Image (spheres, rainbow, N blue to C red):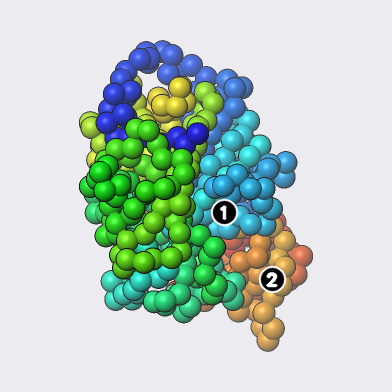
Amino acid sequence: MSITWPQRGILGVLVATFTAAALVTGLVAGCGGGVGTGGTGSFASGPITGFGSVIVNDIVFDDSGASVQDGDGAVRARGDLHLGMIVDIDSDAIIDGAARATRIRFDGALLGPVDSVSPAARSFSVLGQTVTLDDTTVFDERPIGRLDLLVPGGWAEVHALYDPALQRFRATRVEARLVRPLAYRLRGVIAQLDPVGQTFRIGNATFGYAGAAGVPADLANGQFVRLALRTAVPVPGRYEVAAFSTAVRAVDDVDGVVVKGLVTSFASRTSFAVDGRPVDAAAARFVDGLPALGLRVEVEGMLRAGVLQARMVKLRSDDQERDRGFELRGPIESVSAGGPRSFVLRGVTVHLTRADLRYDPGGTGPADLAVGRRVEVKGVPAPGGSGLEATRIKFD
């Protein structure tokens, strides 16, 4: 069954049905320190910002025993996980910022043809949707995914957060494709629904759903949906929906939850949704401001009957996300010849080009970089998205 959250439905269920005492039970969270739980498991959702395990929302998840799935439920390999992918993680209790993941699920927001590219505006269009880039966007550095292959008439898969306030997608990872996918895909929020004509709008495109499989009985404006689209486009600017599927995955009640994303619907500061997941913040503590439509937030709390009962809601600025950067841990896989100017770690090329690069105790500089040497790297996406520029390297 397709699970979606119409905006009006959200407003009906986001009511304060818990007490502050119940909310605190099993939660011992601190800013940046993760969430401690009473042993009933945990759930996290957000972009992957590091490896050496999988790092999401500053929590280090041991993924050695985790199953990996894509958005269609197909089994995937751990090697299919990459920086910038937005994932859902089921795990045991998050304690001192770490946990053992049991399942990791990733799903792109857009997969389809590139309509236009605007380098000056740092944006492009896929499936009629505006996609914006920022200093935290990662481009796939594999040969088939380079930034220079992102051209009109090509195809791309985009991992992104939807901003309904500006009707755009904010890309966290972009992968160019050389071959047309068998089907296109889109996650977004419905507008201008026409039940008679069986069409609706998402962004700048029209979608027809006559004959589509899995049409929700409660289809409505404001609903967060996941669509499989036919690749044939008989009418320019109009795509045909082949099937609806789960847009917001159902999660069992858990006592430890950390979710980071954009506010995708908003009734009040205590009643809103993050990436389509409803939040009840009636007993929450607010940090660095109040939520509003389209703002980036990090929410800690617990899940009850599909509603995130928030303990803390923290606004996250673009500057904070940029400064946080990315992190890689593990043994060096290869080093560039002719004097180290780059090396490969966890399949990511790390460039040694920044003037502010710092080497922590245990190593003095590039001469200490060697295959097999274990390091911890912090960095930011390199210009053009080809790997990371290191800002700090720590030798184990």
Asked if residue 137 shows in the view, the reply is: yes
Closer to viewer: mark 2 or mark 1: 1
Q: Quadrant of residue 145?
A: bottom right
> What secondary structure is found at the residue carrying circle 2?
loop
Mark 2 and mark 1: Cα distance apart in space: 20 Å
The mark found on residue 162 in the picture is none
At label 2, the amino acid type is Leu
Asked if residue 31 shows in the view, the reply is: no
Residue count near mark 1 (Cα–Cα under 10 Å), binned few <14, some 14–19, many ≥20: many
List the residue tagged with mark 2: 369
Q: Quadrant of the C terminus?
A: bottom right
Up the image or down, 32 lies above or below 161; here it is above
At label 1, the amino acid type is Gly
Q: Is residue 3 left or right of residue 188?
A: right
List the residue tagged with mark 1: 50
Circle 2/circle 1 CB separation < 8 Å:
no
